[in-house]
Amino acid sequence: MAPIIVTAKTESAHYYLASGESCHGDLRSARKVGAFPSVTTILGAAGPSKQGLINWKEEQAILSALSLPRNEGEADGDFAKRVVLDSRKEVEAAALRGTHVHSLAEIIINGEEPGELVKGYEEHYAGLKEWRECCVTKVHESESVLVNEAEGYAGRVDLIADIHGVIEVVDFKTRKFKNGKAAGYETDLLQLSAYAYAFTDEGMACRNILIDPATGQLQEIRYTAEQVAQAFDAFTSICKVWRWLKKYDPREVQND
């Protein structure tokens, strides 16, 4: 089993030390201390795969262009800049809602009281609490950093728990629902597989809990241990690509 460092309520990082501490800065800073790239940083080498997210951002820009009034005598370039800035407001607001929902999930998992955090998110809180009470029989790790020194990466996992008596890696994600369902991305499974094999070499099932940021509706997507193992084979290939592109292998630094 890889090292596990509990870092509840800390921000995610692009790089981590072998101890699990966040390494602030860019790749140059990481090289100096032999820091491990995060799972999401590694996945960046696979290129953009969240087409749904890309489409949504484009829709926000189009909506801003349709709704913003044009200033008298305003040049096309100046108007375009205002459209971009306006569309970013909704993107940033969505990110804040996602952080809020993740905080609620963490509080519920740890058996804490949400206080003011629940205001405006009553449905989200109720749905997550019901899921916790119904499905989670034992919590092993919550908001913990996992380090896989053998493959040279690290990352913070939302939850490792017994779900109906079976240990699984769980990742919470806010995602807009359409017609009562949310889409899963290939990177979701790749990310889960990285956490799973940083936790144990034996393989395990994983699942995503998708949460509509507007309504609080929940949807579960479960992956078998076999699916997770296949995804991890792909993830290790992406690790190789990342190391080649960056000309940096943190494993060599750790072994010096």
Image: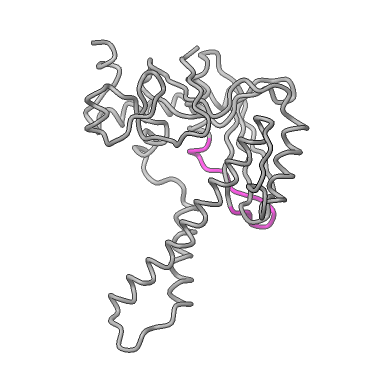
Q: Left or right: 24 with respect to 87?
A: left
Residue 216 in the image: x percent, y percent? Answer: 68, 50
In the picture, residue 240 is in which quadrant? top left
Residue 17 in the image: x percent, y percent? Answer: 35, 23
Relative depth, front residue between 201 and 107: 107
Q: Is residue 187 located in the magenta-colored stretch of the structure?
A: yes
| Placement of 244 over or under 180, stated as above or below | above
| Placement of 9 over or under 180, stated as above or below | above
Q: Is residue 183 located in the magenta-colored stretch of the structure?
A: yes
Relative depth, front residue between 51 and 161: 161
Quick one: quadrant of the C terminus?
A: top left
Relative depth, front residue between 140 and 199: 140
| Placement of 28 over or under 52, stated as above or below | above
Q: Residue at x 41, y 25 (%)?
A: 154
Q: Residue at x 73, y 23 (%)?
A: 137
> Magenta part of the protein: which range?
176-188
| Placement of 255 over or under 144, stated as above or below | above
Residue 79 in the image: x percent, y percent? Answer: 34, 76
Q: Left or right: 131 with respect to 155?
A: right
Give the mark count.
Answer: 0
In the picture, residue 206 is in which quadrant? top right
In the picture, residue 135 is in which quadrant? top right
Q: Residue at x 53, y 23 (%)?
A: 196
Farthest residue toward the front? 115
Q: Residue at x 52, y 37 (%)?
A: 188
Residue 30 in the image: x percent, y percent? Answer: 27, 28
Q: Magenta-highlighted stretch: main secondary structure?
A: loop
Q: Coloring scheme of the render? A: one colour
